Amino acid sequence: MTDEHSTNDATYSGLMVEALLKSKSRRTTIDDASYIVKRLNLKPNAEVLDTPCGTGRLSIELAGYGFRVTGIDFSANSIEACRQGAAERGVEVTWEQRDMREMPDAEVFDGAFCWWDSFGYLDDEGNIAHLKAIHHALRRGGRLLIEAHIAESIFPLLPARDWNWLGDLLWMEQVTFDLPSGRLQRQWTFVRDGVTEQRTISMRIYTYRELLMILQQVGFTAYATYSHRSDEPFRFGGSRLNVVAVK
């Protein structure tokens, strides 16, 4: 990736990768995957795109259900973690280290998802290009599921600080919002055995209306919105937005 807001591969390395691998329980992963299957209306042997796939927890889970999954991420460190995780579970996933604004083929996937703050890393032009690439890769009638913070979900919580122990790894987070850029700034500190590593992630935060307008602009013809991992419609102050868009 080349735009100014992109993270580099060094961001996803060291203690951060370990923290990401440990941050979600198997129960959470199963519940997330089940919801994705439901919202994408996936049939047996469906072709599924995870973009970006991060450390691959959901790609690996869905592959275990028999779906044919492709996980795309720009980070070589993340893709290596994906390969290791898939080997440990004994499942096959197609992993591709690539720019998520570029897809190899048109109309090959039955469903695609961007989960757990996976949308918004780029600038506005880049985020639109990412959605266009997904639209290009989906078959006609295919669905995209985005799980993301939007202004109506995150603003009531800011500024925020949090910390958690992941085994012997301490994970501290500070979250602020930069008004001129419209971007959420997440500063993470990881500490273990006297070693401290810091990472900063910047994400574009859209309003509910802005995100739906972008999806329509890209070419998605229908959408439905929900509160996080539920059947309830999204309302102001909901923890996260889940939106399903149809090609």
Image (tube, grey):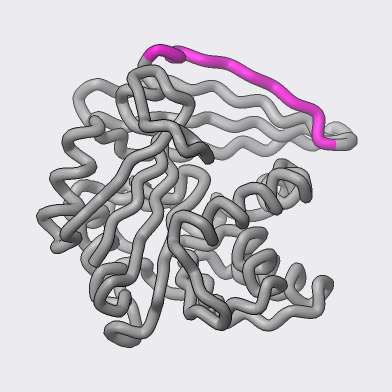
| Residue at the image point whose x is 61% and y is 55% from the top | 34
Q: Quadrant of residue 103?
A: bottom left
Judged left or right of residue 207, residue 40 is right
Q: Quadrant of residue 107?
A: bottom left
Looking at the figure, which quarter contains the N terminus? Answer: bottom left
Main SS category, magenta section? strand
Q: Is residue 206 above or below residue 76?
A: above
Q: Magenta stretch: residue 160 in it?
A: yes
The residue furthest left is: 217
- Percent across and percent down for residue 50 are 49, 66
Q: Magenta stretch: residue 187 in it?
A: no
| Residue at the image point whose x is 40% and y is 18% from the top | 237
Q: Quadrant of residue 194?
A: top right
Judged left or right of residue 189, residue 227 is left
Judged left or right of residue 169, residue 71 is left
| Residue at the image point whose x is 30% and y is 45% from the top | 224
Say how many tags the image has.
0
- Percent across and percent down for residue 12 are 59, 54
- Percent across and percent down for residue 165 are 81, 29
Q: Is residue 230 above or below residue 243?
A: above
| Residue at the image point whose x is 26% and y is 35% from the top | 206
Q: Is residue 55 above or below residue 27?
A: below
- Give 115 or 95, whichever is nearer the viewer: 115
- Give 228 or 5, whichever is nearer the viewer: 228
- Percent across and percent down for residue 36 are 52, 56
For the record, the magenta segment spans 156-166
- Give 10 or 121, whichever is nearer the viewer: 121
